Image (cartoon, helix red, strand yellow):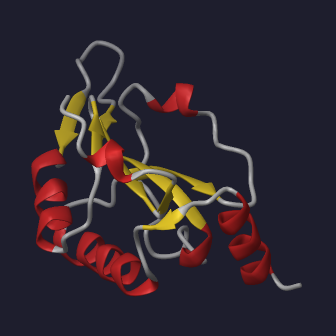
Amino acid sequence: MDEKQKVLAVVNKKQLASIMNNTKWEQLQKFVIDNLPFPPAFQVKYVLEDPPDTENFEEDVWYWGDWQHGLGPFYSIEWMRVRPRYVKHRGRLIEPEIFDITDPFIDILQKLNIPFVQEGRTICIYGYVNSTEIFNLKP
């Protein structure tokens, strides 16, 4: 059984519904690379892997995300958390500078009709869900 078949087997076993497809992921990737001043940091939970440590992603980060090479394969993405802000340190005596592209990032998601959930300053995009009710919750 190849990886895609394993992913589909787990998706069926967990009774998950697909929210995204390759085209939507590719469009999102292209829009982020082509239209934002920096590629925002992200964490990805793949269907066949354990979740990443989300605790270290609650605060602003100092790094960018690898949107060019760090996403695929798209069919295996269960969810993706995006941090559209980053901190640029400017020395020990000067306050760090915060770059925030939350609004332009959300504009891209809305333009592409990609459902998302905003949790504070983090945006979650789902590849698969067990219920679409998460998109109806109000913050």
Point out residue 81 in the picture as x, y percentages from the top left corner.
Answer: 43, 47
Q: Residue furthest top?
A: 93
Total numbered badges shown on the rendered structure: 0
Q: Quadrant of residue 78?
A: bottom right
Residue ID at (71%, 71%)? 7
Q: Quadrant of residue 123?
A: top left
* 96 or 108, nearer to the observer: 108
Point out residue 17 in the picture as x, y percentages from the top left corner.
Answer: 50, 65
Residue 83 shows in the view? no
Task: In the rendered view, tell whether residue 128 sits above or below residue 93.
Answer: below
Residue ID at (10%, 49%)? 103
Task: In the rendered view, tell whether residue 27 sits above or below residue 126.
Answer: below
Left or right of 89? Residue 67 is right
Point out residue 95 in the picture as x, y percentages from the top left corner.
Answer: 23, 18
**Screen quadrant of the N terminus:** bottom right
Residue ID at (43%, 68%)? 67
Point out residue 64 in the picture as x, y percentages from the top left corner.
Answer: 41, 52
Left or right of 129? Residue 38 is left
Left or right of 47? Residue 118 is left
Residue 26 shows in the view? yes
Q: Quadrant of residue 38?
A: bottom left
**Screen quadrant of the C terminus:** top left
* 111 or 8, nearer to the observer: 8
* 122 or 139, nearer to the observer: 139
Residue ID at (24%, 36%)? 137
Left or right of 23? Residue 116 is left
